[in-house]
Amino acid sequence: MIENDDRVLIFAPHPDDDILGCGVIIHDCIERKVPVKVVYLTYGDGNELSFIKFNKWDLPVVIPHEVKEMGERRHAEAIAGEENLGLDKSNLLFLGYPDFGTMDIWRKHWGVEQAAKGLFTRANKVPYSDAKRPGAKYKGEEIMRDISEIIENFNPTKVFVSHLYDHHPDHQALHLYVRSALMTLGSSIPLLSYLVHYTHWPDPQGYHPDSPLEPPLPIDPELVWTTSPLTEKGKGQKYNSIKKHETQYKANPTMLESFIRTNELFSSIPMISLTEAKTGFEGVNGEVESEHPISHNIKIEDGNLDQIIRYTKVLEKRATIFLYLFPFQQQVKFSRLPKWCLKITKSHVRLYDQSKLVISDKIVHHHDLKNRSIEVSIPLDFFPNASHLFIQTVNKIEHITVNWTRWKILQLV
């Protein structure tokens, strides 16, 4: 997988994800003397359960300066883990955006919107002095700026990033930021995705160094997976690097040891071509493993984006379905484009551009309670000159996410 003339760039949502997903890639780069750089989106300062277990406390870490101290602890663990593989800390970059907050930024903190606030640090800008850009606001365009600059300056031949189908929102968000940055740069650099969080996976759980790491089931059958084998030396170094992340290893050794296998696993994630010429529902089929999954099917017809959202359980009165539709244009900064969100309840549909309510009579919807489906038709005029569309459906009861469909990237032209 790694060639002698490669330049490898690895993006990790949190310290330890780089080792779990790409430990053998980093090991191979060091062995071949291939330039490699690792970029951490967050300091991992929001993993409250691990901090409780590590500190042997009965209560979560909630005081901002203590949360920051845990972030600094994980920063040190990341350096130790990579140095164990032979990668000097000069090849590590920490961005310092909010743990468990980067998907919220992706959805509604762009442009004129206020900066997001960290759930635990309560900061609205990067609080770490050793981050790439201390003081950078918690805004989508700031994350995009950092990622784009890193890609342009390092000039990689291969990029590795967390998987879009991962069940952790920070992992999904990082993929979206990196993918949109590469699209904005017009780059054709290969993008390979690694999975960390997925229900009942890896299977079996625990330390099984002689077993292969295989894709979870069920998962999108259109994904093409590739593997990178681990040598015995590579397994040993990866295992020791995982143990350097003491706060995480102490909290959940079984989960972390599940990634010591005979191989690491990567996939590319294809865009879905959706054009006026096609008929029927195109496979934006985002069922999530859940007791009550939802699915989302889409087609383009008569100048409209027609969608059917189906759910298996009767919607509660307090339930709201959020349909996110983010257009992309090569010539326009992503931060300046609308971030549409349809909020759908039993009684009404409202359209927002982030926090701004938009009044429109052009959106047609029909809620079929008997068949548990919602039909929505949106004129393509809402996405003028857009070449692509980022799209997702989320079902919430008040502020609690019940289920969701996977983010998909539609190619419109």
Image (cartoon, rainbow, N blue to C red):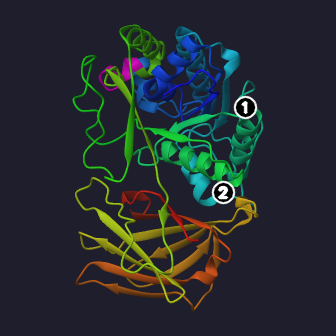
Image quadrant holding the C terminus, namely bottom right
104 to 203, vertically: above or below: below
Of 30 and 407, the residue lying toward us: 30
Of the numbered discs in the image, which one, if any, rests on residue 268?
none
Label 2 crowding class (10 Å Cα cut-off): few <14, some 14-19, many 20+? many
Q: Which residues are magenta?
A: 249-255
* Amino acid of disc 1: Phe
- Closer to us: mark 2 or mark 1? 1
Q: Quadrant of residue 348?
A: bottom left
396 to 58, vertically: above or below: below
| Side (left or right) of 384 relative to 314 | right
Q: Position of residue 257 (x, y in %)?
A: 33, 20
| Side (left or right) of 280 relative to 328 | left
Find the distance from the CA under tag 2 to the CA under tag 1. Answer: 27 Å
Q: Earlier in the sequence, mark 2 or mark 1?
A: 2
137 to 88, vertically: above or below: below
Q: Could you tell me if residue 16 is visible in this image?
A: no
Of 12 and 290, the residue lying toward us: 12
- Secondary structure of residue under mark 1: helix
Q: Position of residue 76 (x, y in %)?
A: 60, 16
Q: Residue at x 34, y 20 (%)?
A: 260
Q: Residue at x 44, y 59 (%)?
A: 399
- Judging by the rendered image, the residue that carries numbered circle 1 is 154
- Judging by the rendered image, the residue that carries numbered circle 2 is 109
- Secondary structure of residue under mark 2: loop
Q: Quadrant of residue 353?
A: bottom right
Q: Position of residue 88 (x, y in %)?
A: 65, 12
